[in-house]
Amino acid sequence: HKFGGNTERQETYKQAEQRLITQLQSMLTEEMVSQGQYDKWHRECCEQLIESFAAVGKHKMYYGQAQKWINMALKYLFVLDRELTSRNYQFFHIPIDNIVLEKLATMNEPPVLTTAWSRLDSYEEYLKFQARYRSAFAGTPMDNEFTLWMK
């Protein structure tokens, strides 16, 4: 929001993009052993993106925006190269956005947020949403998200 007018936007974006690439490469070469380990990596990755925007561009990025970058990047990587993502795919979080929230709203007791997804500023609330989503569906969260998108 209002980032387009930021004079440091290109440098901020480049730094954030490089941090994300580094984090993704690191995670994809490591075999996560638990959801907790993945969640810890994911939080650190979100915090690095948020820090990049604050440090260089003096711009506020929210956990909601950071999770979308990370989770969509992993979703695209899965589509492009399943073997690359197969080690940790079972732990991936679903990307939260208006379309997913709209589709989930039809469920009994859907996972909900207290604010717009893009303004989500609490990692604990974000993680509760992911846990609620995982408990609502049997199987792998991202497989279920792909199915949800097809509805």
Image: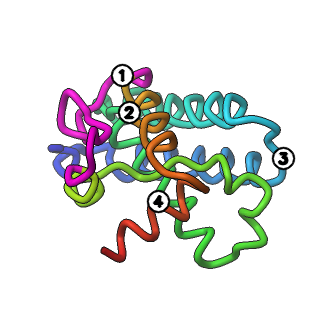
Magenta segment: 105-124
Q: Horizontal and vertical percent for residue 146?
A: 46, 69
Q: Secondary structure at mark 1?
A: loop
Alpha-carbon span between mark 1 and mark 2: 7 Å
Residue found at the far front of this picture: 108
Residue sitting at x 38%, y 33%? 63
Q: Amino acid at mark 3?
A: Glu
Mark 3 vs 2: CB contact within 8 A: no
Q: CA distance from mark 2 to mark 4?
A: 14 Å
Residue 124 coordinates in the image, percent (x, y): 43, 21
Spatial CA span between label 4 and label 3: 19 Å
Reading the image, the residue beneath label 2 is: 63
Q: Are marks 1 and 2 in contact (CB under 8 Å)?
A: yes
Task: Specify how the rendered protein is coloured.
Answer: rainbow
* Amino acid at pointer 2: Tyr
Give the residue pinned by disc 1: 122
Disc on the earlier residue, 4 or 3:
3
Whichever of labels 3 and 2 marks the residue nearer the N terminus, that label is 3
Q: Which residue is found at the position 72% from the left and 31% from the top?
A: 37
Badge 2 marks a residue whose secondary structure is: helix
Instruction: Determine whether the residue tagged by mark 3 lies in a helix, strand or loop.
Output: loop
Q: Which residue is mark 3?
A: 30
Q: Residue at x 31, y 25 (%)?
A: 121
Identify the residue under disc 4.
72
- Between discs 4 and 1, the one toward the N terminus: 4
Q: Earlier in the sequence, mark 2 or mark 4?
A: 2
Quick one: 78 or 137, which is closer to the camera? 137
User: Magenta stretch mostly in which secondary structure?
Assistant: loop
| Amino acid type assigned to the residue bearing label 4 in the image | Met
Judge from the rendering whether residue 138 lies leftward or rightward of residue 72; answer left or right: right
Across and down, in percent, residue 9 comes to 32, 48
The residues tagged by marks 3 and 2 sit, at their Cα atoms, a distance apart of 24 Å
